Image (cartoon, rainbow, N blue to C red):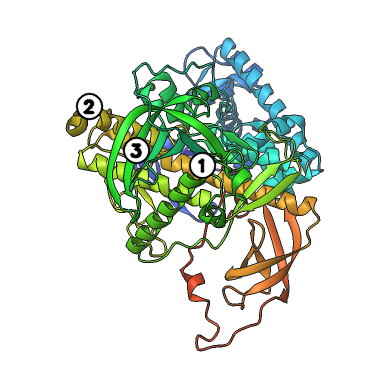
Amino acid sequence: MFVLFDEAGKFLAGRVLSESDASAQVELDSGKRVKVKGANVLLRFEKPEPAVFMAGAQALSETIELELAWEFSPEDDFAFATLARDYFSKDATLEQQAAMLIRLFEAPHYFRRAGKGFFRKASAEVIAQALVAIEKKKAVAALIAQWAQELGEGVCPQPVREQLYKILFKPDKNAPEYKAVVEASRATRTAPLDLLQRSGAIDSPYQFHWKRFLLENFPQGVGFAATTAPAITEPLPRAPAPAFSIDDSATTEIDDALSVQGLGSGAVTVGVHIAAPGLALVPDGEIDRLGRARLSTVYMPGYKVTMLPDAVVQSYTLQEGRDCPAVSLYVTVDEATLAILTSETRLESVPISHNLRHDQLDAIVTEEWLQTALATPGSEPAPLTGLQPKLAFLHRLARSLKAQREVVRGKPETFNRPDYNFKLVGNDGAEPQGDEQVLISTRQRGAPLDLIVAEAMILANSTWGNWMAELGVPAIYRSQASLAPGVKVRMGTKALPQDGNGVKSYAWSTSPLRRYTDLVNQWQIIACARHGSTAALAAPFKPKDAALFSIISGFDAAYSAYNGYQGAMERFWTLKYLQQNAVLELDCCVFKDNMVRADTLPLVLPVMGAQDLPRGARVRVRLGEMDLITLDIHGTVVERLDTPLVDANDGAPDADLQDEQDEEVAGPIVIAVDVNEAPLVASP
């Protein structure tokens, strides 16, 4: 005896070995034995063998006309055998009954299941809708097949091109464009990114990176709706001395400025003045929500995406020739010893006399120039008229503050590598297209103007951080437990030491137009300035405020993504520089395994032939092919430029170089192995 039975939606047939009222022991053709409930047994037959029976029934089912079967079927629930007798004849064979069962089961748009072996006919309206859907599905499948074929032949269909970045980075797995890429990738055994490159889908490497960044971080675009900055209505006293800012020429969000009073009196007052949007903006207000959505300005060569609308920035930026609202930190310094005697925070309006620019003045404001006594006071070149004595004192103070921090750090700060400036010729701040001529220049870290600003900001951030902690006002701090390798800077609400800077605590507060954490901290500082010892009650954010932790979490993620994109774009333009200037060889320094760093460009790359060289070895590298999509480039060592030293360390790397922390290197884009997983392209 053989039986046909339903096993989890599949129809199987086998030989009955034993049977009871409730179940049967059945042996399949494969030899597997299964226990089948009596209710699941749909047909019993003596011959032919199960495999032959099922093959015949399957073939016969394909001849059954669904429309005719639907016409013959009753309105109420019916058994498959009943419809088989109506369709074939009243003496329908077991094979015909099995064929009807299979056909009904495979046509849910005509017949829905109503139990084991029972069905109910669908309405004419449901069938019409289902048939339209089936035809549409067939048409989509045909399109997918056609697009996949075109992709395999090196041609990108326009619908796939239009969905390119979504397919690669945030795909809808049900979309036909995505399925076509997956199908073509499988058929050609080619990685999706390579497939799309070969088919001409990516016509601009720069746009590839830019559109990807927008899709991941600004899916609604980078524009702002028309916004009006609220005015600062609070009457503010005017600062007693004018201030000047020091920034790069491309900076429009001028957050900070400095002032100096009392030179020659023995006690000099240095002012650190920070733009004060916090005096007008309020937490959870319209503009605050814009800033919190972005959390930081995004920088890249030749372009930036600001945290706040330009109209808002221009309302509060420290523009020369204006009296600007500011949160000011005044420190009184002993002119001889440079010891800090007192500090005070004020809310005031500060006249801004100059917006100085690093890139225009670094060659003038050197240590020698600052130490040279002017024969005629006020004879400095414009726009430095009258500023040399102030800059000279600020430079002395900055060097003293740096030395004090180095004592706390337990090691000196060294600036072994320059900062690099990128200029896109003719860009003028517009969104780059990727084919601009790029110029790369250097600005040595620790240059006088750079040092003055850096130390003033560290002084303000640490002083305000300590002050808020003393008053019990929570803030967003950056801390670092030690300088040991692998110990990273963390953000939190506790005033913990920042060993990297050698300060007791460090609260980012000096860039409220560019970083949301600084705006949050400015609100807290303003509460401290207004309310003193009772500031904890008046501050917008209270201790253990969940909003602070949410801001920290969001900022960490956004800042990391923005910095990663900035690094990738700097690498892109560096590779473009090599390409535009036909650079074939570079002088480099070995710094880790087979990785080298270029001497005169912000470029790190793997090279053949450096594996056994010590850290710090200098080599000439011949460059290989570059890929502006993956940002990948390799090289080969062709010459050793220094003389190998053999000493007691047996070629061990120089200790100073060992102590230097390796910066994160922008690496190539990694292609996902499994094309079923999304996204198809992922960052390292």
Give how far across and how far down residue 661 sits, in percent: 48, 63
Give how far across and how far down residue 277 sits, in percent: 41, 26
Q: Nearer the viewer, residue 264 or 323?
A: 264
Q: Disc 2 vs disc 1: which is toward the camera? A: 1
Q: Nearer the viewer, residue 361 or 123?
A: 361
Q: Nearer the viewer, residue 161 or 5?
A: 161
Say which residue label 1 marks.
Answer: 387
- 388 left or right, relative to 397: right
Image disc number at residue 538: 2
Q: Is residue 319 above or below residue 73?
A: below
Give how far across and how far down residue 348 sits, in percent: 36, 27
Q: Residue at x 43, y 56 (%)?
A: 399
Q: In what element is the residue under mark 1?
A: loop
How crowded pointer 1 is (Cα within 10 Å; few <14, some 14-19, many 20+) is rated as some
Marks 2 and 1, how far apart at CA: 40 Å
Marks 1 and 3, how far apart at CA: 20 Å
**Looking at the image, is mark 3 or mark 2 earlier in the sequence?**
3
Badges 1 and 3: C-beta atoms under 8 Å apart?
no
Task: Give the amino acid at mark 1.
Answer: Leu
Asked whether residue 140 appears in the rendered view, the answer is yes
Task: Give the amino acid at mark 2.
Answer: Ala
Q: Is residue 412 above or below residue 580?
A: below
Say which residue label 3 marks.
Answer: 329
Q: Could you say which quadrant of the image residue 211 lies in?
A: top right
- 156 left or right, relative to 398: right
